Image: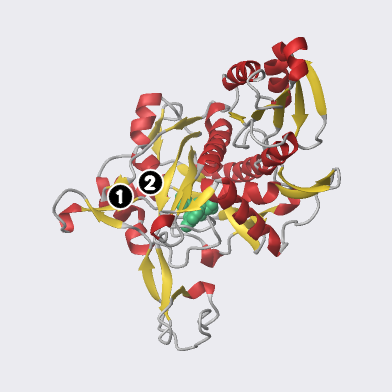
Amino acid sequence: MTKSSPSVNDPDLFDAVVNLCKRRGFVFPSAEIYGGIRSTYDYGPLGALMLRNVREAWWRAMIQERDDVVPIDAAILTNPKVWEASGHLATFTDPLVDCRKCKERWRADQIEDVCPNCASKDLTEARPFNLMFKTFVGPVEGDSSVAYLRPETAQGMFVNFVNVLTTTRRKPPFGIAQLGRAFRNEITPGNFVFRTREFEMMELEFFVPPADSPRWHQYWCEERLGWYVHYGIEGEKLRLRPHETEELSHYSAGTTDIEFLFPWGWGELEGIANRTDFDLRAHQQTSGTSLEYFDQATGESYLPHVVEPAAGATRTMMAFLLAAYDEDEIGGERRAVLRLHPRLAPYQVAVLPLSKKDTLAPLAKEALHRLQRYFMCEFDETQSIGRRYRRQDEIGTPYCVTIDFDSLADHQVTVRDRDSTEQTRLPIDDLVRHLQDKLDI
Ligand code: GAP
C-alpha cells in the first residue's frame, strides 16, 4: 500500500488533520462554550494519550536508554532574578508593529512592511515586546511580588546545576533533562498548535568540557534527527538548518534547527544550541554562588559548556499527525488512516466483539482485561465491524482484535493489521505475546 494524496505540501492536508483532530477528540479550542480563547487549545481524550506518548518517546530516548542524563521537574513560577540573569528580561523580545489603519498588531520580522490584514503601509516603528507572562505571587500586587511563568524549561536546569551535581555525583559530560509547560505571549500565534501561547517543551541541557562542545553539538544534531525518523517521519520531510548569525538567540554561539516540511513550508521542530557557559556564568555572577565543576583528575575548576537540544512536544505531535495522515482505498471504499508509530498511537489495540449480543461480552471483556495490563486499549461494540475498523484506522490504532461466535468454541480471535489490513487467527492465550512482538513493546 503506497501513500496517496493528500501529501505534505498539499494545502488540503492541514485542513484534513485539523478537522480530524476536532472531530475525533485530539484537540479542542480551549473553553469553546465561551467562544474560546485565542489560539489556546485543550487536548481531548486521544490528544492527551498521544501527547503522553510523545513525551514518553522523548523520555525513553533522552533519559531511560542513556546512562548520562538525569531528569528534573522544576517550578513554572520563577523568581524574576532568574530571568534577569538569563537575559530574558532584557532581550526575550519580538519586534512589534501596529497598523495605524486597522489597529492589528504584527511581528515586524514576519511581514513585508505591509499590514497582512488591510494592506495598509501605515505602520508604527517596530518596538521590542517582551514575550514573558508576568504575574504576582501572593495577595499584594507590587514590584516585590512579581514572578514570571517560564518561557523555557532550561533555566530550571541551570539554577539546579549544583544541586544535581552534588546529589548525583555526575561529571561532565552529563545532561539534565526536563519536559513541561512553557508560556510565551506570542504576538502572532497560529497554524493550529504550531505556535501557541501555552505549549509544552522537551529540553536537555548537556554539560561538557568547553573544548568538547562542537563535537557534542554534532552528536546531538544526528541523534535528534534520528529520533524523528525512528518515530515515523520520512527523511525527506526533515532537514537540519544552521542559523544565520543575526537570528541566533542572545545565549547561543551556534544553533541548528531540525525542520519539518509543514503544509505551508519548512518550520522548526527543535533547536540544538551551543549555549557555551553563558547561563552558568550569568547565574554565578548574579547569585554569587560558584557553579564551577571541580575536576579531580586535573585539579582544575571550570564552568562547563552546554549543548541544548530543545523541542516542542505539542508542535512535534502535530508534525507526527501530519506525517502519518494518509488516504487510500480498501475494497473500493476510501479510508483515512493515521500511520502512526505504534508507540505514538493513542491506542495500541482495539477490542471489537463482532456482535453486541451478551453471548460474546464475557470473552471480549476477558480479552480486553488481559490486554489492558500491557497496552492502551479501546473497547468498541457499536456499529458494523467495517465501520469500527475505519474508526480505528482513522485514529491510528495499529491492531484490532475481533471476537466472533467461533471464538466461543475454539478460543481463537482475529487480529487485524491497520496498514496491510491483513487478518491473522490465533489462540486467545497467545494474544499478548503476539502483540508484544508485533508492537515491540
Ligand atoms: N531553551 C531553548 C528554547 O527555548 P526555542 O527554539 O525558543 O528554544 C524550543 O524553543 C522549541 O519549542 C521550538 O523548536 C518549538 O518546537 C517549541 N516552541 C517554541 N515556541 C513555541 C510556541 N509558541 N508554540 C509551540 N511550540 C513552541
Which residue corresponds to mark 1? 82
Which quadrant of the figure has residue 245? bottom right
Does the beta carbon at disc 1 come under 8 Å from ligand 1? no
Q: Which residue is mark 2?
A: 155
In the rendered image, residue 371, in percent from the top left (x then y), is placed at 62, 20
Badge 1 crowding class, 10 Å Cα cut-off, few under 14, some 14 to 19, many 20 or more, is many
Label 2 environment density (alpha carbons within 10 Å; few <14, some 14–19, many ≥20): many
Q: Who's the residue at 53% across and 55% down the image?
A: 193
Measuring from the top left, give residue 108's x and y in whole percent: 48, 75
Which residue is situated farthest in the left direction here?
140
Residue 274 position within the rendered picture, expressed as x and y whole percent measured from the top left: 52, 50
Query: From what the image shows, is residue 91 above or below residue 323?
Result: below
Marks 2/1: CA distance? Answer: 7 Å
- In this view, 102 is above or below 393: below
Name the kind of residue labelled 1 in the image: Val
Display colour scheme: secondary structure
Asked whether residue 206 is in view, the answer is: yes
Q: Is residue 257 left or right of residue 134?
A: right
Q: Amino acid at mark 2?
A: Gln
Q: Are marks 2 and 1 in contact (CB under 8 Å)?
A: yes
Q: Secondary structure at mark 1?
A: helix
**Which of marks 1 and 2 precedes in the sequence?**
1
Q: Is residue 206 left or right of residue 379?
A: left
